[in-house]
C-alpha cells in the first residue's frame, strides 16, 4: 500500500498499486503532487520511466499510463498557472537563494582565507529548521535531518582530530547534512570525496610550478600555492552540497 502526504493538504490518499497486476514493477519514484476533493476524486502523479496517475471522478477511477508529452499535459497534476504560483512564492524563492548563497560564500571564504566562519555554519543549520518549519515539514522529518547532521558532525570531528579535514569543514558538512537528510547523505559524501580528490590533484600540480611574481604578491594566491597550507576542502563540500540539493527532502517539499 502506498500512502501519499502533501504539505498543503491535511488528507492522505491510499491506493493499492502494489497488488495491481497491470502495474507491478513500476518504479516508485518521487511524487509530483497530490490534488483532489471528496466530490471529484483524486489525481496522483509519479515521476518515473513510466508515469502512472489516478484520474476520474469518485465513482469511476482509472490508472493512466503516461507515454508521451501529450498524455503528460492532458493528465497533469497541476496547471501552468498553479505551477507559476508555486515557483514565484517568496518563501520558495528565499530557499532557492539561501542555500546556494551560503554554499558559495563558504567555498569563497575557504578559498580566500582557508577558514569557514562559524556564523555561516550556524546560519545554515538554523536556516534549515526555520525554512522547514515554514514549509510545514513534520517535526519528525526535521528531527531526522537534525539527527543526520549530528551523525555527520561526529564523523567529521573524528576526521578533524586525525588532521584529515579542518574544523570549519567539519561544521560545514554537518550543517549541509541538515538540509540534505539521510536520503541524500551517502551521495553527498561520495561527491565530496570525488571533488576533494580532484581539487587536491589540481593543487598538487599547480604547486609544483613556480608562482609568477605578480601572483606571488596576491596574499590569498600565495597562501593557496604554499605546499604546507593544505587543501581548502570547503570548496569540495560546497560543490557536493549544491549537486545534491535537488535530491534533498526540503527541495521535494518546495517543488
Image (tube, rainbow, N blue to C red):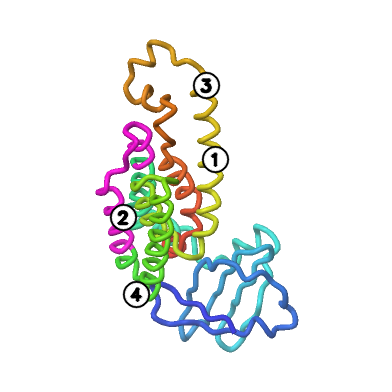
* Residue 96 picture location, percent across and down: 38, 51
The local crowd at label 3, few if under 14, some if 14 to 19, many if 20 or more residues have their Cα within 10 Å, is few
Residue highlighted by disc 4: 139
Q: For residue 208, which numbered disc appears in the image?
A: 3
Residue highlighted by disc 2: 90
* Residue at the extreme bottom of the image, as rendered: 59
> Residue 255, can we see it?
no
Q: Is residue 184 left or right of residue 97?
A: right
Q: Residue at x 54, y 56 (%)?
A: 187
The local crowd at label 1, few if under 14, some if 14 to 19, many if 20 or more residues have their Cα within 10 Å, is some
Label 1 vs 2, first from the N-terminus = 2
Q: For residue 11, which numbered disc appears in the image?
A: none
The rendered magenta stretch, by its main secondary structure, is classed as helix
Q: Is residue 182 left or right of residue 150?
A: right
Label 3 vs 1, first from the N-terminus = 1
Residue highlighted by disc 1: 197
Which one is in front, 253 or 183? 183
Secondary structure of the residue carrying tag 1 is helix
Q: Which residues are magenta?
A: 106-131
Closer mark to the observer between disc 3 and disc 1: 3
Closer mark to the observer between disc 1 and disc 2: 1
Is residue 190 shown above or below 228? below
Q: Residue at x 41, y 30 (%)?
A: 228
Q: Residue at x 39, y 16 (%)?
A: 215
* Residue 217 picture location, percent across and down: 33, 15
Measured Cα–Cα span from mark 3 to mark 1? 17 Å
Label 3 vs 4, first from the N-terminus = 4
Amino acid at each position: 500500500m502506498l500512502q501519499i502526504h502533501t504539505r498543503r493538504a491535511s488528507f492522505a490518499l491510499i491506493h493499492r498499486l502494489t497488488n495491481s497486476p497491470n502495474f507491478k514493477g513500476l518504479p516508485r519514484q518521487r511524487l509530483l503532487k497530490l490534488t483532489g476533493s471528496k466530490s471529484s476524486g483524486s489525481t496522483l502523479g509519479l515521476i518515473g520511466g513510466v508515469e502512472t496517475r489516478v484520474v476520474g471522478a469518485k465513482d469511476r477511477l482509472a490508472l493512466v499510463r503516461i507515454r508521451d508529452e501529450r498524455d503528460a499535459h492532458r493528465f497533469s497534476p497541476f496547471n501552468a498557472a498553479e505551477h507559476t504560483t508555486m515557483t514565484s512564492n517568496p518563501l520558495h524563492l528565499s530557499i532557492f537563494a539561501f542555500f546556494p548563497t551560503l554554499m558559495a560564500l563558504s567555498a569563497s571564504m575557504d578559498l580566500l582565507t582557508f577558514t569557514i566562519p562559524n556564523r555561516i555554519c550556524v546560519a545554515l543549520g538554523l536556516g534549515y529548521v526555520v525554512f522547514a518549519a515554514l514549509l510545514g515539514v513534520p517535526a519528525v522529518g526535521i528531527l531526522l535531518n537534525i539527527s543526520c547532521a549530528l551523525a555527520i558532525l561526529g564523523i567529521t570531528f573524528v576526521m578533524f582530530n586525525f588532521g584529515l579535514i579542518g574544523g570549519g569543514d567539519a561544521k560545514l558538512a554537518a550543517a549541509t547534512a541538515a538540509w540534505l537528510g539521510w536520503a541524500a547523505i551517502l551521495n553527498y559524501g561520495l561527491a565530496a570525496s570525488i571533488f576533494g580528490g580532484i581539487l587536491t590533484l589540481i593543487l598538487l600540480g599547480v604547486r609544483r610550478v613556480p608562482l609568477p611574481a605578480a601572483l606571488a604578491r596576491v596574499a590569498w594566491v600565495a597562501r593557496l600555492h604554499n605546499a604546507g597550507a593544505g587543501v581548502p576542502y570547503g570548496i569540495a563540500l560546497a560543490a557536493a552540497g549544491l549537486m545534491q540539493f535537488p535530491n534533498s527532502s526540503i527541495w521535494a517539499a518546495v517543488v
